[in-house]
Image (cartoon, rainbow, N blue to C red):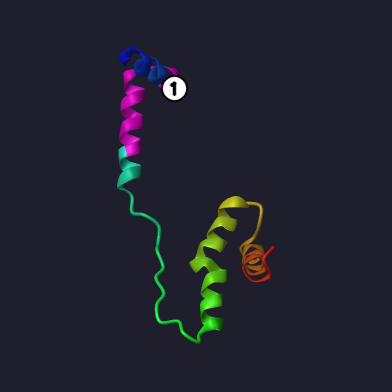
Amino acid sequence: MDNYFVSLLHENFPSTEDVMAELINLNVINGLPKGTELYISDIHGEYESFNHILRIGSGNVKEKISELYNDELSNKEVNHLTLLVAYCGI
């Protein structure tokens, strides 16, 4: 059984240094703070505000569009596309 795991590791990480580097990388990633969480309470009768918060996704829509279209769109185009996605449901 141990040889099985060693052979799997060797397929992706040919040397001991590569395995150690990946372990360090995964440890660092594991230690990063998690994404922002949004908690909303007492929203009775506040449909417009609540709907706005849901549609904008607390900035995640713009962030994902920026990541997806990296250098292809200007900042103004990213802003326009964000509004289209968030408010028109494209």
Is residue 54 shown above or below 46?
above
Q: Nearer the viewer, residue 80 or 47?
A: 47
- Quadrant where the C terminus sits is bottom right
Q: Nearer the viewer, residue 39 or 73?
A: 39
Q: Is residue 13 magenta?
A: yes
Q: Position of residue 17 (x, y in %)?
A: 32, 22
Q: Is residue 70 visible?
A: no
Q: Residue at x 32, y 32 (%)?
A: 23
Prevailing secondary structure of the magenta residues: helix
Q: Residue at x 39, y 77 (%)?
A: 41
Q: Which residue is mark 1?
A: 12
Q: Position of residue 62 (x, y in %)?
A: 56, 62
Asked which secondary structure carries label 1, the reply is helix
Q: Residue furthest bottom?
A: 45
Residue 87 is drawn in which quadrant? bottom right
Q: Is residue 16 magenta?
A: yes
- Quadrant where the N terminus sits is top left
Q: Residue furthest front?
A: 44
Q: For the residue marked with disc 1, what is the amino acid?
A: Asn
Q: Residue at x 64, y 66 (%)?
A: 76
Magenta region: which residues?
A: 11-26
Left or right: where 63 falls relative to 32:
right
Q: Is residue 8 visible?
A: yes
Categorize mark 1 by other alpha carbons within 10 Å: few (<14), some (14-19), many (20+). Answer: few
Q: Nearer the viewer, residue 74 or 15?
A: 15
